[in-house]
Image (spheres, rainbow, N blue to C red):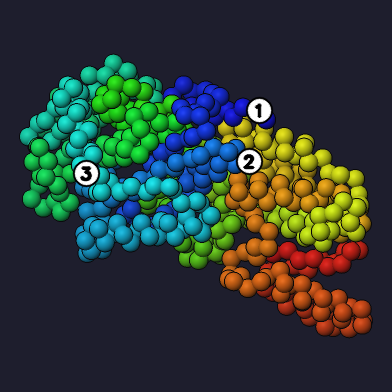
Amino acid sequence: MQELQLFNTLSRKKETFEPLKEGFVGIYVCGPTVYGDPHLGHAKSYVSFDIVVRYFRYLGYRVRYVQNITDVGHLTDDADDGEDKMAKQSRIEQLEPMEIAEKYTYRYFRDMDRLDVLRPDISPRATGHIPEQISMIKKLVEKGHAYEADGNVYFDVTSLPDYGKLSGRSLDEAESGARVDVSSDKRNPADFALWKKADESHIMRWDSPWGDGFPGWHIECSAMATKYLGETIDIHGGGLENQFPHHECEIAQCEGAHDTPFVRYWMHNNMVTLNGRKMGKSLGNAITLEQFFTGSHELLSRSWSPEVIRFFLLQSHYRSTTDFSEKALESAETGYINLVSILDAIHKTADAGNGDEGGSNSAGEPFDLQKLMDGLHACMNDDFNTARAIGLLFEQLRPLKAVLQSANAPSNISELSEFLVHFCGDVLGIWQPGEAGEGAGDLPFDGVMQILLDLRQTARQNKDWETADRIRDRLAELGIIIEDGPGGSTYKLS
């Protein structure tokens, strides 16, 4: 198998992945600020990194995946000014900030579970790691990288000569882009807050060497990433919009405190757009995942299943922009149904042949499984290219559908089915044999469907066309399409 290549935002090129410790990968991804429901933009990011985690495990690595929960310190302008997003939402809903955090953390994990996004190994909360953040700030002050001013503590960006290396911004550019009041107590407009003084009305506050206050947004991730993954970590991921200032500031904090490289590979997913404009809560154009699942948004004509949303996102590369439209979702749904119908047919044929070469359903020429495996591995090893992988699955598996119900099914159909369970299930997270889709609950769906198919087949043999057609039509109303072929009848979900 060829080596895994991933695009490193820091070097701006693809690099061969080499772990810091053999057989182990430490991954940190910036998690949500839990002041609202997750939307399609969140899904793009966390489905993208879910693929990264899944593929490393598929390759045999032990992975520690850390994804934080931001429940304090993220201000409304994403920098050092404005109101804390958590405090603002708590005022709007008239709830305690921690009630807001609990409410939206639950909803975040609920919707990620629906999308089959694996839970992180560690989900640290910013409010649970205040001592670690204060400790790192004290170290930065002691080393001359930070200074206190009237209860606020700021990082001095001039203390690190390579500040801006991730985003490619010079210090002059960072200064010109900073928004600072004329009364600011910063020495330099580009300096950023490590600790903010809390005024009398501020609810979320902690004692510190600099007085009552709360941490800056950037220091939270630095403290939590290094606590659980070490001073140098393998991979740090997040949305492209976080490259500056958030990730740039993380680098400055960690490398200033520890005098060692912070991250070996930076990965950034691109955004979801709506009519060419970024989709986001702060822009007021976000469609939440719950609205997709229920069809309760004015831009949606119907509900959409989590499986289709995931498939839709995987059809574009994680570094590419994904532009939302219902037409694109319809296309993804058609593709998903077609692919799953092929995968189900392969699995059912393998089961019917009991995995024996030369069995009644496996007497044909062997399928070129090695070609498929090599092709899919090449796609994933090329910077996790799920879009190409899905295209390759269609290209190589579609010709099989016509022969699967005949006596000419490939003799190695069991091996093919076993591989597809691992790749399409464990890596892509889009299929598991026997899954009937949302709403099937705990019913043995395949078994129930087989009973109905057998009843319909009996009706056809007895030339009871009225009953046969009624079963077909009633199932079609439920979104289940019956396909009659030379080898019998099969079904697919519509």
Q: Quadrant of the N terminus?
A: top right
Give whichever of discs 3 and 2 has the lower sequence position. 3
Please rate how many residues cluster around mark 2, counting C-alpha atoms within 10 Å: few if below 14, some from 14 to 19, many from 20: some
Give the residue drawn at x 56%, y 65%. 302
Q: Which residue is mark 1?
A: 2
> Residue 277: image x %, image y %?
45, 43
Residue drawn where x is 57% and y is 32% of the image: 383
| Tag 3 near tag 1, CB within 8 Å | no
Residue 256: quadrant of the picture: top left
How busy is the neighbourhood of tag 1: few (under 14 within 10 Å), some, or many (20 plus)?
A: few
Residue nearer the viewer, 32 or 265: 265
The disc placed on residue 121 is none
Identify which amino acid the numbered label 2 is placed on: Ala
Q: Nearer the viewer, mark 2 or mark 1?
A: 1
**In-image side of 53 versus 131 (left or right):** right
Q: Which mark is residue 130?
A: 3
Alpha carbon distance from label 2 to label 1: 19 Å
Q: Earlier in the sequence, mark 3 or mark 1?
A: 1
Is residue 52 visible to us here? no
Name the residue that disc number 2 marks: 387
Q: Secondary structure at mark 2?
A: helix
